[in-house]
Amino acid sequence: MSELLKMLGCRYQIIQGPIGMFNSPKMVAAVSEAGAYGMLALGFINNLDEVKKLVGEVRALTDKPFGANIMLINPNNAEILKVLAEAGVSTVTTSVGSPKDVYPIIHGLGMKGIHVVLALPHALAAVKAGADALVVVGSEAGGLRSRNPESSTMVLVPLVADNVKVPIVAAGGIADSRGYRAALALGAQGVQVGTRFLASAESPASEQWKKAIVECGDGGTDLIPALNMRVAQRIIVTPWIKQKMSDPAVKNIADELEINPDKTGNYERAAFGGGQVSALIKDIKPIKEIIREMVS
């Protein structure tokens, strides 16, 4: 058994990629029930009662191990970690911020932490700060991205593997058994999967979002400014967005997009998140089937 699997306590070395404020206990539980490591996305949640509610809902659906992601810009992380530890969560991922202050808290609670990194200097700093493992995210991944030049998964994973001794989880461009096995060959002990699970039967993503992923072709995603332009976000370029991006009168495409289309019903302007791997996803399947095919 690999060091990563010992840390996670699950059957398969596959971690569900957390997606912003997008939480579904049913989806997290489905990932864990299928033998992988389901993850709650707690980065934007400050309310401890909401954290307890989400954790309780997952635990009511599965007795298998699951974790949570915390963003290090959240001021309530110490309290959130205590809630998770009390609920029996043994491993969390950390992202968006310096890990040096949070890892003493994580280890003090008897937990393990896996820090998300986008570049080699970040990886080295995270290991120095006490990270027990790393999620190494290539430039093709969905979600929040750096606005600095980045390396692809194919380059970044072996680069980090050559320079650290902790387990590595590869992320970015992984949706099937080909990507899964390639990541292991590059030096990773496991993978983190986001977009493929987003386009699953258990995902609460809208039908419009899932349709955008399935219909996304080669070159069908792009980066736009996010979080007051401090970072970037990868989205699927729909026909409406493509037209707006080519309009010289539009100075910042992010200002034109609908952030909460499920609430407003304005799906035409929706900023549907998704990695470049969306181009490989052609159908919506149950999570159990996705995982079974990935490890086959």
Image (spheres, helix red, strand yellow):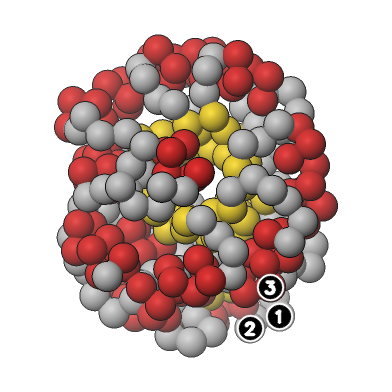
The numbered dot on residue 246 is 2
- Distance (Cα) linking label 1 and label 3: 35 Å
What residue is at 60 percent from the left and 43 percent from the top? Answer: 133
The numbered dot on residue 197 is none
Q: Nearer the viewer, residue 154 or 223?
A: 154
- Mark 3 sits on what residue? 155
Q: Amino acid at mark 1?
A: Pro
Q: Earlier in the sequence, mark 1 or mark 3?
A: 3
Q: Which of the 4 image quarters holds residue 146?
A: bottom right
Reply above or below: 42 against 27. Answer: above
Q: Amino acid at mark 3?
A: Val
Q: Earlier in the sequence, mark 2 or mark 3?
A: 3
Marks 2 and 3: CB-CB under 8 Å?
A: no
- Distance (Cα) linking label 2 and label 3: 31 Å
Q: Nearer the viewer, residue 19 or 295?
A: 295
The reply, left or right, for residue 238 in relation to residue 249 is left
Q: Amino acid at mark 2?
A: Ser
Asked if residue 224 can be seen in this view, the reply is no
Marks 1 and 3: CB-CB under 8 Å?
A: no
Q: Tell me the SS state at disc 3.
A: helix
x and y percentages locating residue 252 in the rendered image: 69, 64
